[in-house]
Image (cartoon, helix red, strand yellow):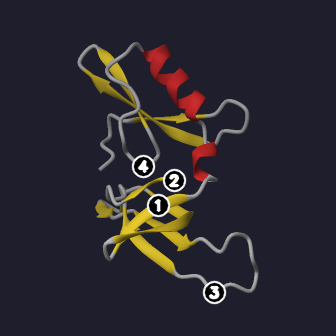
Amino acid sequence: MITPDWIPHRRASDGELVGWVRPAGDDWVAVSLFGADLTEPVDWLSAEEALEEQGLSWMAGAWLLRRDGRDIRVRLVEFSPDRIESGAVRPGRVVVKTDDFGAIDVPYELIDLPWPPPPELRPL
């Protein structure tokens, strides 16, 4: 869950959200869009640099989802973190689709996962 002390970090070039910086004592931790720590506690500039370095390119690649005892290849379709609306917590979600390898005539399945995603979803 994103807490009010997490500070959104947006790319300077286009304003796209690439993660958050959260306090850790006198230091800061870079946090990915999946809510995972990208750094140990570091200074503010190092946390920002880690987020800029990771960017959004990781979203474009194929992922593996462990399902029913086997790994299936998937692609990220949508993700949104938990958020607070009208004082209530709205749970986030991650949507993946089975990889169709770019073919337009191959059926695929959309799979809803919670945010942050479970460890069964990992980069290929």
Callout 4–callout 2 Cβ contact below 8 Å: no
Can you give x and y, in whole percent of width and height, for residue 47 in the image? 45, 22
List the single residue furthest toward the right. 104
Q: Using the numbered discs, state the Cα–Cα distance from disc 2 to disc 3 in whole angstroms.
A: 21 Å
Q: Which residue is mark 3?
A: 107
Q: Which residue is mark 1?
A: 64
Amino acid type, label 1: Leu
**Which badge, 4 or 3, is on the more N-terminal residue?**
4
**Which badge, 4 or 1, is on the more N-terminal residue?**
4
Q: In what element is the residue under mark 1? A: strand
**Which badge, 2 or 3, is on the more N-terminal residue?**
3
Q: How many marks?
A: 4
Amino acid type, label 3: Pro
Q: Which residue is mark 2?
A: 124
Q: Which residue is mark 4?
A: 34
Amino acid type, label 2: Leu
Amino acid type, label 4: Phe
